[in-house]
């Protein structure tokens, strides 16, 4: 079962329990009103109180479980998560290789990149239900190739997005889009005026992701793996 199908099943299960919980709550209220003489409705204490009360509790637990399992959270990476992040990178590298996208390899990104980002306090972990589903780095560092970009924001208020990736199992579910929105919100809080990034031209899904998020082409850059597009979003 893939991730999107699993999410849909959990959502349908939550909707079903919400319905059952709502009906049970109404039966419970009617029974209480009947017992107090407010309404002339007759329900036995077992059928009208015990069972509906149990159903309401079960429904609340199911609904809570759904939101806990699907809620996306963001946290600054600390020591002790290197192996977890590296495992995510390795999964992404394998997935890209299977798609014929020669962007990441054994040399980049590696453990030293993770350690450096953690030390600088610029690596963010994206979790869903406690599981690591994505990561990204946001800082002020840009490669020398960025100097040749035609950026609209020429101030020093820019931030640069690096290594945003989603675990292959969790892709196509809106996590990357949600992460980009979160990144923009955090950047605005820090007083940033724009966000810059580079995207591999042979990774069409990534290019489309940033275009749909409002990032605009700002020139070309050439790195070890070939041609990249510089992109920018003014906040």
Image (spheres, rainbow, N blue to C red):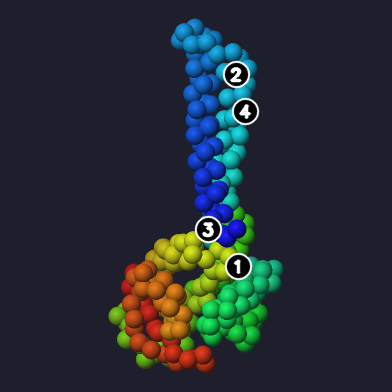
Asked whether the viewer can see residue 47, the reply is yes
The residues bearing labels 4 and 1 have C-alpha atoms spaced at a distance of 41 Å
Q: Which quarter of the image is occupied by the N terminus?
A: bottom right
> Image height check: is 194 above or below 36?
below
Q: Nearer the viewer, mark 2 or mark 1?
A: 2
Dot 2 or dot 1: first in sequence order is 2
Q: Nearer the viewer, residue 195 or 92?
A: 92
Check if mark 2's residue and mark 1's residue have beta carbons within 8 Å. Answer: no
The residues bearing labels 4 and 3 have C-alpha atoms spaced at a distance of 31 Å
Q: Secondary structure at mark 3?
A: helix
- Mark identifier at residue 54: 4
Q: Secondary structure at mark 4?
A: helix
Q: What residue is disc 3 on? A: 4
Q: Could you tell me which residue is drawn at 53 percent across and 32 percent down?
A: 20
Q: Secondary structure at mark 1?
A: loop
Q: Counting other residues with Cα less than 10 Å from the Cα at mark 4, is it few (<14), some (14-19), or many (20 or more)? A: some
Q: What residue is disc 2 on? A: 47
> Image height check: is 78 above or below 9?
below
Check if mark 4's residue and mark 2's residue have beta carbons within 8 Å. Answer: no
Q: Nearer the viewer, residue 65 or 140?
A: 65
- Mark identifier at residue 20: none
């Amino acid at each position: 079962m893939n991730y999107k199908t699993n999410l849909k099943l959990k959502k349908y299960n939550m909707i079903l329990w919400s319905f059952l919980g709502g009906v049970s709550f109404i039966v419970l209220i009617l029974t209480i009103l009947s017992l107090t003489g407010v309404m002339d409705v007759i329900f036995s204490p077992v059928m009208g109180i015990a069972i509906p009360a149990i159903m309401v509790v079960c429904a609340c637990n199911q609904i809570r479980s759904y939101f806990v399992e699907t809620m996306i959270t963001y946290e600054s990476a600390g020591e002790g998560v290197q192996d977890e992040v590296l495992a995510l990178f390795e999964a992404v590298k394998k997935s890209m290789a299977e798609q014929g996208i020669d962007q990441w390899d054994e040399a980049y990104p590696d453990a030293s990149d993770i350690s450096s980002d953690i030390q600088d306090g610029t690596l963010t972990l994206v979790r869903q239900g406690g599981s690591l589903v994505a990561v990204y780095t946001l800082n002020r560092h840009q490669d020398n190739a960025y100097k040749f970009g035609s950026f609209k924001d020429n101030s020093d208020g820019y931030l640069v997005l690096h290594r945003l990736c989603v675990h292959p199992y969790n892709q196509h579910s809106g996590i990357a889009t949600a992460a980009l929105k979160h990144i923009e919100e955090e950047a605005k809080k820090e007083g940033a005026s724009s966000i810059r990034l580079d995207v591999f031209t042979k990774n069409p899904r990534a290019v489309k992701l940033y275009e749909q998020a409002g990032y605009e082409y700002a020139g070309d850059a050439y790195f070890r793996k070939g041609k990249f597009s510089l992109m920018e979003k003014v906040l």
